[in-house]
Amino acid sequence: MSRRLLTAVTVLALVATACGGDDDAAPTTSSSTTSSSTTASSTTATTTPPTQSAPTSAAADAFPVTVNVGNGPVTIAAAPQRIMSLSPSLTEMLYAVGAGDQVGAVDKNSDFPAGAPVTDLSGFKPNVEAIAALTPDLVLVSGDRDGIVAALGTVGIPTLLLPTATTLDDTFAQLATIGAATGHVDAASATVTAMREQIDALLAEVPEREAPLTYFYELADDGNTVTSSTFIGNVLSLAGLTSIADPAPDAAGGYPQLGAEAVLAADPAFIFLAHSDGSAPTTDEIAARPGWSELQAVRDGHVVALDSDIASRWGPRVVDLLAAVVAATRGTT
Amino acid sequence: MRNPARLPVAWLLAAIAFTLVAATVAVTFGPASVPASQVARALLDLLPGVDVDHGLHGPLAAVVTEVRLPRVVLAGLVGSVLATAGGAYQATFGNPLADPYLLGVAAGAGLGVTIALTGTGEALGRAGITSTIAAFIGALVAVTLAYLLGRDADRARTTASLILAGVAVAALFSALQAFLLQRDDEAVRDVYGWLLGRFNVAGWSQVRLLAPIAIVSIGAIVGAGRRLDVLALGDDEAAALGIDPVRVRRWVILAATLGTAAAVAVSGLIGFVGIIVPHALRLLTGPSYRRILPLSAICGAGFLCLADLVARSALAPAEIPIGVVTALVGAPSFLLILRTRAR
C-alpha cells in the first residue's frame, strides 16, 4: 500500500514537472531537456534502486549554488556526485528529488529505498575519519552530534545540517534545499507540489468533528509518547487528532513519558503503536494491561499499529503516515 | 541495665507511622483525580469478605487497585530493600560511602538489560520479563565475579580488595555495555529508559517477583544487626567475642546483593536511597545497626513512596524518571539533616 502511494506521488511529480515551466526560483535556469531527464531519473530512483542513468542528470550549470541550512550558508561548487546521507529521512528525500544516482553512501539505518548504498556508518555516533575515507563531496546530517559538522569542515567536506522537522513545511523546505544542493530544483518542487496535493486529497476525507479525537501515541512499552507540538503530533493534528499528553507542562518536552494511570484517566479515542524498536505489542497485549480493556480505544477496536520507520521519519513518506491515520480514523466522528 | 543499642519502641512506631502516612498519601493522589472516599472504598473492596461499591467505572475502575496500589507497594518494597542493603554494605565494609551498587550490581544489571534489548539478544525476545531476568542474572554475575576475584596477593579477602575488584568488574561491564550500545544505537533509548526507573509500568506481577526475595533479604540483614554491631569494633575484637567476621560479611553481602539485584531488575537503577536513608537514620539514632537496619527497612519504603509520588505528580500527566527524583529530593534534604546535626 505504501509502495503504491509512493508511486502515485512520483507519477504526479512527473506530470507536474512535465507540465510546469522553468519559473522556479532556481539559481540558474536549466534547459528543458535537462529538466525532463532529471524528472525521469527521479521517478525511477524513488520507486526502484538507482538506475544506470548518467550522473550528469543533475543540472550542472546551476552550480555553484549556496543553500541556507542549520549550519549557515553552505556553498557547493559543482553538482555533487558522491553524496553521503547520515539520516534515513534525508536519504529518502535525496531519492525523492531524483538525486539517487548521486548518492555514494548512506548510514546503516537508511533502509529505504531498497538499493540505497547502505554502509555501517552511524548517524548517532558519526566518525569523521570513516566518513572522509569514503571521499564524499557532500554530507547530509540531521544532527550535529559530537561536533561532526565542524569536524567535516576542517577536512573540507561541505556538510548540510538539516535538523529534525517539526512541521510539514520544514519537510517541504528541506526537500527544496536538497533539490537545490544536488541540482534538482524542478524535481524537488514537483515532489513538494505532489505531496501537497496528495495531503489535500487525504484531508478532504477527514470528516467534520465537534471536537478533535484524542489519541495516545505509544513509542515504547514504558509510556513514551508525543505531544501535538512534535512533527508526528503536527501531522496527526492535520487529521483532526489531539494528543492526550498535551496537558503536560513544557518542561516534560515534546516526548513525555506517561504512566498507565494518566492514560486511563485521559481515556483516548485512539491508540497508535509506533514502537521504535519494532516490537509493538498486539491488541490483545494492550487489552491485557490492567484496566486498559475498559479504554474507549480498546473497546472500539481503535488500536492502530503504524509502520515505525515511516512514523519516525520526516521524509516524503510522511504522506503514507497521514494516509494510514486518515484511513484508521475516517469512520469516527 | 538499659541497653543503649536496642531499638526504642517509640522510634519503631514513629517509623511505621511515617511510612503508613506516606503510602496513604501516595495511593490517594495521582494524575487521575479520584476522590479520597472512593480510593478508600476501592481499597476496602479489596479485602476478602468485604464488598463495597467504590463507584468507579470504566477505565478508572482499575486505577486504584490495579495501577496505583501495586505501584505504591512496589516502590515501598524497592525502597525498603535498597535502604536496608545500603545500610548492610556500609556496615560490612565500614565505609559510609558504600551504597547498594558498590560491588557492581548496577553495571551487571545494565549489561544484562543491554544484552536483552540490543540485537545481540534478539533471540531472547524483548518482553519485559526477559529484561527483568537478564538484569537479575547480570547483577548476580557481576557481584560473584567481584567476590571471586576480590582477593589480594596473600589470598586474603579484605574489604579493600573486594571493593577494588567490584570497581574493576563494574568498569569492565560498563565498557561491554557501551560496546553493545555502540553497535545498536537504536536500543540506547530503551536501555536508558529502563535504567532510569520503571515504576510507571509497575503491576502486581513485579510485586510478586520481588516480594519473596525482598522479605528474605531484609530479614537476613536485619537479623544480623547485633553481629554487625560487634563487627564495628574491629575484626579481632569480633573474633574474640566468638563471631567469625568473614562468615558474617559473606552472608550479609549475599543477602544485600540478592535483594538489590531483584530490586534493580523490577525497577531499574534508583540511586541515593541506599545512602541517604541509613545515613539520615544514623544521624538521628546513633551508630547502632540494631537501630539503623530495621528503621531503614521501614523508612526506605516511605521515602520511595513519596519520591514516586513526586515523580508522577510534578509534571503530570508526564512522568519524571524516579532515579532523577530520588537524587533531586534526596541530596538537598540529606545536606539539610547533616547541617542541622552539625550545629
Image (cartoon, coloured by chain):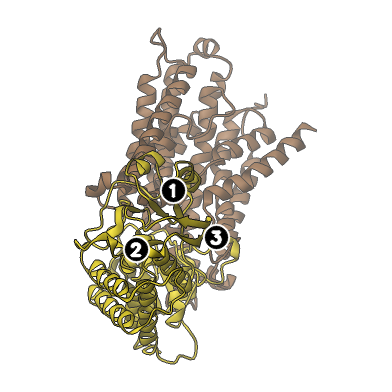
Is the N terminus of chain B in the top left, top right, bottom left or bottom right quadrant? Answer: top right
Which mark, residue A94?
Answer: 2
State the hue of chain A: yellow
**Subunit bearing disc 3:** B
**Subunit bearing disc 1:** B
Q: Nearer the viewer, mark 1 or mark 3?
A: 1
Q: Amino acid at mark 3?
A: Arg
Q: Are marks 2 and 3 on the same chain?
A: no
**Subunit bearing disc 2:** A
Can the viewer see residue B10? no
Estimate the spatial distance between the alpha carbons at disc 1 and disc 3, rounded to whole Å. 18 Å
Which mark, residue B312?
Answer: 3
Which residue occupies the foreground of this view, A172 or B157?
Answer: A172
Can the viewer see residue A189? yes
Left or right of residue B75: residue A184? left
Which residue occupies the foreground of this view, A120 or A131?
Answer: A131
Q: What secondary structure is found at the residue carrying circle 2?
A: helix
From this view, report whether residue B231 is shown above or below residue B104: above
Q: Tell me where residue A13 appears, x and y as whole percent.
A: 31, 78
